Image: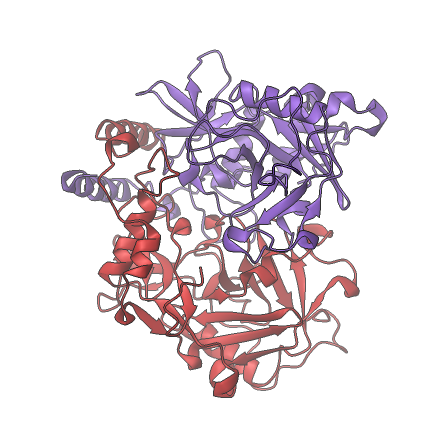
Chain colours: A purple, B red
Amino acid sequence: MTLAHKYLGIAVMAFLAQCGLFASDETKAKAPIMAEVLSNSTPADWRPLDPENTLYMELASGRVVVELAPEFAPNHVANVKALAREHYYDGLAIVRAQDNYVVQWADPNAEKPDLARKIQHARKTLPAEFDRAMDPKMPFTPLPDPDAYAPMAGFSDGFPMARDRHTGKMWLVHCYGMVGAGRDNDPDSGGGTELYVVIGNAPRQLDRNVTLFGRVVQGMDLLSALPRGTGAMGFYEKPEQMVPIKSIRVAADVPEAERSDLEIMRTDTPTFRNLIESRRNRHEAWFQVQAGHIDIANVPIPVRLRNSGGSRK
Amino acid sequence: MTLAHKYLGIAVMAFLAQCGLFASDETKAKAPIMAEVLSNSTPADWRPLDPENTLYMELASGRVVVELAPEFAPNHVANVKALAREHYYDGLAIVRAQDNYVVQWADPNAEKPDLARKIQHARKTLPAEFDRAMDPKMPFTPLPDPDAYAPMAGFSDGFPMARDRHTGKMWLVHCYGMVGAGRDNDPDSGGGTELYVVIGNAPRQLDRNVTLFGRVVQGMDLLSALPRGTGAMGFYEKPEQMVPIKSIRVAADVPEAERSDLEIMRTDTPTFRNLIESRRNRHEAWFQVQAGHIDIANVPIPVRLRNSGGSRK
């Protein structure tokens, strides 16, 4: 940023402040509270997970459910599913838990040629899928507020994303629970054998630096509450600290009776826009000041047992 | 926000984008990486914790160190210290761990008149200290980038804060590790008997709705990795799930040999401004795209053992 741009930024901020964009006391138009949005929702406001684009990671402590995003990272999604289907992940482990950052799972023996898990049909690495071309046919619910890291942020089919009309690109963004494919310094060195999930404050500086391909929709607490690793970058230093992964399966390959029958609130509806508004200005009795603003990492995407009528979050 | 303001916001965003404020590809001016900033820092870039404004919460798993912010919440700081000095907290418990939100500690028997811990000299409730008047004499290091929730954000003496020249107010903001005093719906119903710490994505909507008075500078992982409560809002449902608090002490009351000899990077120095820059544009070899931006919740405040020369974070 040049000095001129910096001063421009300050001038613009002063202008926004004058216009009341930050003067939350002036933005008390009555909005619903989230509990009302949920209770007033109809079955059409929810959609089931697609079993072909859902992963189950089974830990001793329970199941982590990941929704995949083939529209944003088709090759990574296909490869992770291929790895799951050849049972690549079964018996591997969570090897890293860095506080306020990420939990990561991988082959603990990846660096030992004799012991490393062999890939049968899937690929070890793939070209990066950091962003993709904007597609006007894809649903997009923009946030009404400016995003700090991108020209515009919003939601597409249940995923937090950003886009830039200037470059014609859109990309998934690093919010809590987002799942990506770890890589080395070569941008094309990831592929799905090392996966991570965000467990802390949204590390938006990672956006467009690493391929995101999914989001944890249930079971985050099985990952976020793991003991932090004491090694550099939160890696576990002893094998016995690692958390074994019993299996990772594509939901479609799991007998129907054993699936997690979840549904997610659709993000392309008036109901979801009401939900966003309910979080921009909080009218629960406890709140004294409405922020008049929401950032993408603070918008919840409700999930519940299918046909339960009860929200799970 | 009126419709006119909303469109204005979009226009301003487009303008900023044109100017390259979000076009990170255009902002690759070479900046140091954080490791260089730390290794090049001098003793004058660090300050010790003031024992009179430091709390130690002792858990079976270790010590949590909280730095207090008397400049922002003098009455709450004084009352929490008074509570600690009459041993009010000793034997109470962590009663709540809500995923991606807060951990809270309190008297598990607060609602039972016969069993509730009695306050001796401190106060049960205090007038809210949600914000305070700006003071040009206080150090303030602004972030160079716009903040989503306030006209300007930055750091004062080690604390993340925001301010508004229009109202003449400044306030601490809800970043990871910030500590506040829980309250009921009455804004003046908090006081320090129920405390919380942010363990998830910065819940900035809470800013100016609740009194923040400190920040955890060491031991966050002892709180953030606790099992999540399964009751409403993450409360533990069974007494045996609660985590006992052995004691909370003012560091000045602890024998010097038993204190945590930490020092914090000063936030009013060229070194800290370099650190901010090192996080706005990441020049480590791994990064392909620089964000050209940082939000306040993503700026680390380094802490280390005093005179160690080695960073602890």
Residue farthest to the left, as pictured: A4
Percent of width and height locating residue B34: 34, 52
Q: Residue at x 78, y 65 (%)?
A: B239
- One can see residue B37 in this view: yes
The count of marks equals 0
Identify the image quadrant of residue B158: bottom left
Percent of width and height locating residue B99: 62, 49
Percent of width and height locating residue A95: 62, 46
Percent of width and height locating residue B148: 37, 43
In the image, residue A227 above or below residue A108: below
Q: Residue at x 50, y 72 (%)?
A: B126
Q: Nearer the viewer, residue B310 or B301?
A: B310
Compared across the picture, whether A35 is left or right of B30 comes to: right
Identify the image quadrant of residue B263: bottom left
In the image, residue B222 above or below residue B34: below
In the image, residue A150 above or below residue B273: above
Residue farthest to the front, as pictured: A114
Q: Nearer the viewer, residue A136 or B62?
A: B62
For the C terminus of chain A, the image quarter is top right
Q: Residue at x 39, y 60 (%)?
A: B301
Compared across the picture, whether A195 is left or right of B291 comes to: right
In the image, residue B127 above or below residue A32: below
Q: Residue at x 58, y 22 (%)?
A: A123
- One can see residue B122 in this view: no
For the N terminus of chain A, the image quarter is top left
Q: Nearer the viewer, residue A58 or B103?
A: A58
Q: Nearer the viewer, residue A283 or A92?
A: A92
Residue farthest to the top, as pictured: A137
